[in-house]
Amino acid sequence: MLANKSRMTFAAVALLGLGLSGCATEQGAAKSDAKTETVKAAAVETRAALPQQYFELHKDGRIWVFGDAKLYQTAVAGKEVPLAMTRIGAGPKRETVIFGLTKDESKKVSSLPQIALFEGKLEGAAEGFYGEIVKAGRHYVFDGWKEMKDFRHSGEAPYVFTYVGAGPKRATVVYVRNKAQSKKAPDELIARFRQFHAL
């Protein structure tokens, strides 16, 4: 009888142990899921915080860089940019680089995304991105940061749609695409460019 009681107690303790370990495993899994969701949410937030636009104007041997669309348009129109930060020899071919700044941007220069993008310390947004580079009188237009980054490094683009006289002051406009986009005219990007420049 005592031996049976002893076995029953041992079995009850073993079952209780199994039950507790099951709870611990479920709690561990719940914590792991919560951690995964937190990491995913942080990644989404980071992607959302990536810069949505970036502009370069190559003029007179200098590279002007802008994060603000209106300020960039002011420079493209040939008007004076009131606030700027200059870095002599900071360009890829030792060009002088001038960062055009709004009044608000001039107060937080160290954290400006357009500077980080130019220096390669930050990536542009994966979705919703818009960028332009004006070089040799042509407007190169991008809706993907990767294509823009590649063009900035090589100065070339393998897939383009070119429209002569379609830009501001009858400038040529070159829409830079990736391989997947190269089979269809960039109607949405054309519309965005025209709206951007009020054409």
Image: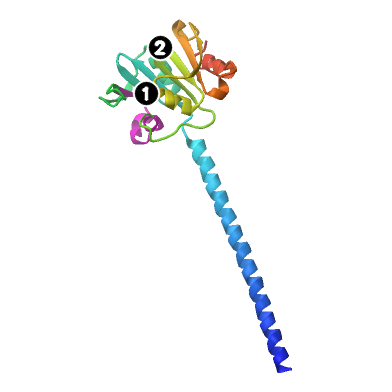
Q: Circle 2 is placed at which residue position?
A: 77
Q: Circle 1 is placed at which residue position?
A: 65
Residue 26 inside the magenta-drawn segment: no
Q: Residue at x 46, y 31 (%)?
A: 124
Frontmost residue, 1 versus 39: 1
Q: Residue at x 48, y 6 (%)?
A: 164
Asked where in the image residue 148 lies, by quadrant, the reply is top left
Give the spatial CA distance, label 2 vs label 1: 15 Å
First-in-chain label (2 vs 1): 1
Residue range of the region highlighted in magenta in the rendering: 97-117
x and y percent of residue 127 in the render? 54, 30
Frontmost residue, 17 versus 69: 17
Q: Is residue 157 left or right of residue 115?
A: right
x and y percent of residue 180 in the render? 57, 24
Q: Amino acid at mark 1?
A: Val
Please rate how many residues cluster around mark 1, counting C-alpha atoms within 10 Å: few if below 14, some from 14 to 19, many from 20.
Answer: many
Furthest residue in direction bottom, as rendered: 1
Image vertical order of residue 8 relative to residue 195, above or below: below
Q: How is the image coloured?
A: rainbow
- The count of marks equals 2
The quarter of the rendered structure image containing the N terminus is bottom right
* Number of the front mark, 2 or 1: 1
**Dot 2: element:** loop
Image vertical order of residue 77 relative to residue 116, above or below: above
